[in-house]
Image: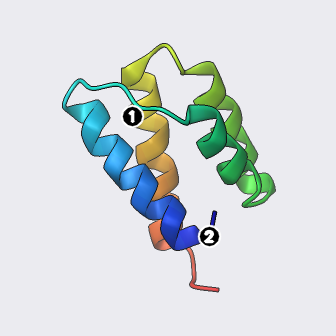
């Protein structure tokens, strides 16, 4: 998954989570986040461990999305 696709998916899923909905593909998102590098690995682990907790999952998605938005474009 490319960075723009990841940002789009995170934003879409974050909106769904905030509306109280569940999301699919959490493991795939965690894998994509982990591939971004060492500074994202902690988020990938937290995403995997938050699968059953939508509030924590939303928090992690928001943190990753914010970090990606602030990162210099490659």
Q: In the rendered view, does 62 fall on the left or right side of 49?
A: left
Any mark on residue 12, and which? none
Name which residue lies at 26% across and 43% down. Answer: 15
* Most distant residue in the front direction: 24
Cβ–Cβ below 8 Å for labels 1 and 2? no
Tell me if mark 1 has few (under 14), some (14-19) or many (20+) residues whose alpha carbon lies within 10 angstroms of its own. many
Q: In the rendered view, does 19 fall on the left or right side of 7?
A: left
| Percent x, y of residue 10 | 44, 51
Q: Tag 1, which secondary structure?
A: helix
Q: Which residue is mark 1?
A: 58
Instruction: Find residue 51 and report its image quarter.
Output: top right
Which of the two marks, 1 or 2, is nearer to us in this view?
2
| Percent x, y of residue 24 | 48, 32
Q: Which residue is mark 2?
A: 2
Q: Tag 2, which secondary structure?
A: loop
Which image quadrant: the N terminus?
bottom right
Taking the image as drawn, is residue 66 in sight? Answer: no
Name the residue nearer the viewer: 9 or 41: 9
Which image quadrant: the C terminus?
bottom right
Instruction: Find residue 71 and report its image quarter.
Output: bottom right
Name which residue lies at 35% across and 25% down. Answer: 22
In the rendered view, tell whether residue 2 sits above or below residue 48.
Answer: below
């Amino acid at each position: 998954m490319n960075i723009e696709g990841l940002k789009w998916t995170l934003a879409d899923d974050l909106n769904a989570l905030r509306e109280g909905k569940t999301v699919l593909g959490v493991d795939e998102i965690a894998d994509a986040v982990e591939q971004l590098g060492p500074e994202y690995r902690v988020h990938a682990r937290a995403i995997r461990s938050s699968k059953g907790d939508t509030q924590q999952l939303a928090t992690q998605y928001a943190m990753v999305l914010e970090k990606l938005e602030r990162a210099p474009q490659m």
